[in-house]
Image (cartoon, rainbow, N blue to C red):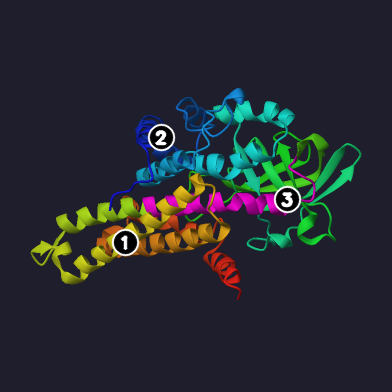
Amino acid sequence: MKRTVYEPEHEAFRETVREYIERELVPHAEKWETERIVDRSAYVAAGKYGLIGFNMPEKYGGGGTDDFRFNAVIDEEMAKAGVPGPALSLHNDVVAPYFNNLCTEEQKERWMPGIASGETIIAIAMTEPGAGSDLAGIRTSAVRDGDDWIINGSKTFISSGINCDLVVVVCRTDPEAGHKGFTLFVVERGMEGFTRGRKLDKMGLHAQDTAELHFENVRVPHANLLGKEGHGFYHLMQNLPSERLSIAISAIAGARATWRETLQYAKDRKAFGKPIGSFQHNRFLLAEMDTELEVSEQYIDRCLQAVVDGELTAVEAAKAKWWCTEVAKKVVDQCVQLHGGYGYMMEYRVARDFVDGRIQTIFGGTTEIMKEIIGRDLGL
């Protein structure tokens, strides 16, 4: 079914993304996978191609184009390529909106030029060793001390935790205020007491650095408070839908690429004297996957249009996130099975996709939490 959500300018942008991937990522993919970290130069290169900061104001070095369809094009092409690269979806889709929507003019002047150029890498720190899906369980604290705040606590599973220069930290500023007791702060590289723990040894996505972050009496100026004091939880709720849609987009685009390779494999690989795709079970399986992917693509496109129209709700984003990631997980697992023994070999993309994609039903809010959001909206 024809996709109609994209305009000609989005398709032209798609070619730019593909050129960036081919020239700037593919030649270094094996090295980054081995070293288990993407070189910072990949972010700067993305800035030069216009793949970072396009959704930030022009006066601060951005592109001035706040159209989430451009974000989606990057997410799709990065997922299709299946090569290690910088966390552009984290940078553009997840963290940049906090700076766009919450920064004061002074903060924008300080931070945005570097973010837009790719020279300043950004991250967000929500999850803690004892608080994942339950954000209300966050214990990292910030206590006012004159014109500063003193932050203490630890965060874990922080994407770009090693490379980041600025990290938005979710802190509890009033232990008695419930959801109104959280505030966001921007902690900068080099602040005394801010340290990075180990780079975590993940099942997949080896080249994308994920780390523990520690804050021991980190003195942060009040000028680094992001948004309104006591409104941190509400700021998170406003921005999480775009993160969840971004994950859904990447999941389906990546699974579609895996499916295409598997379809070709089923045509080429022979068993008992004929292509394995000609066996009814395998033919039906590939047909089912194609259908599930296309139905998911159409819902994603509707969500994208809702973002453009300013209508996407948290519930709709939750539906996209859980459904698309679960479909992707199912599709990639079936593709491994269709590859037989070769599907277990890391030299085949399908094996890498299997381990790299497994996190998608977990990060950004687990499938179970997404269903909880939807269920509560039903009045249950």
Residue plotted at (25% across, 56% down):
262
What residue did someone put label 2 on? 25
Asked if the residue at tag 2 contacts the one at tag 3, i.e. Cβ–Cβ closer than 8 Å, the answer is no
What residue did someone put label 1 on? 336
- Whether residue 2 is visible here, answered yes or no, is yes
- Labels 3 and 1: the sequence-earlier one: 3
Residue plotted at (53% across, 51% down):
311
**Mark 3, mark 1: which one is toward the viewer?**
3
User: Which of the labelled discs sits on residue 232, or is there none?
Assistant: 3
x and y, in percent, of residue 213 in the image: 68, 47
Local SS, label 2: helix
x and y, in percent, of residue 364 in the image: 56, 55
Identify the amino acid type marked 2.
Answer: Leu
Question: Where are the magenta residues, as a range?
Answer: 226-253
Alpha-carbon distance for marks 3 and 1?
Answer: 42 Å
* 284 relative position to 26: left or right: left
Local SS, label 1: helix
**Mark 3, mark 2: which one is toward the viewer?**
3
The one of 9 and 287 positioned closer to us in this rendering = 9
* 50 relative position to 135: left or right: left
Identify the amino acid type marked 1.
Answer: Val
Asked if the residue at tag 1 contacts the one at tag 3, i.e. Cβ–Cβ closer than 8 Å, the answer is no
Alpha-carbon distance for marks 1 and 2?
Answer: 25 Å
Alpha-carbon distance for marks 3 and 2?
Answer: 35 Å
- Whether residue 201 is visible here, answered yes or no, is no
**Vertical order, 31 against 353 (above or below):** above
Magenta segment includes 40: no
- Labels 1 and 2: the sequence-earlier one: 2
x and y, in percent, of residue 24 in the image: 41, 30
Q: Quadrant of residue 58?
A: top right
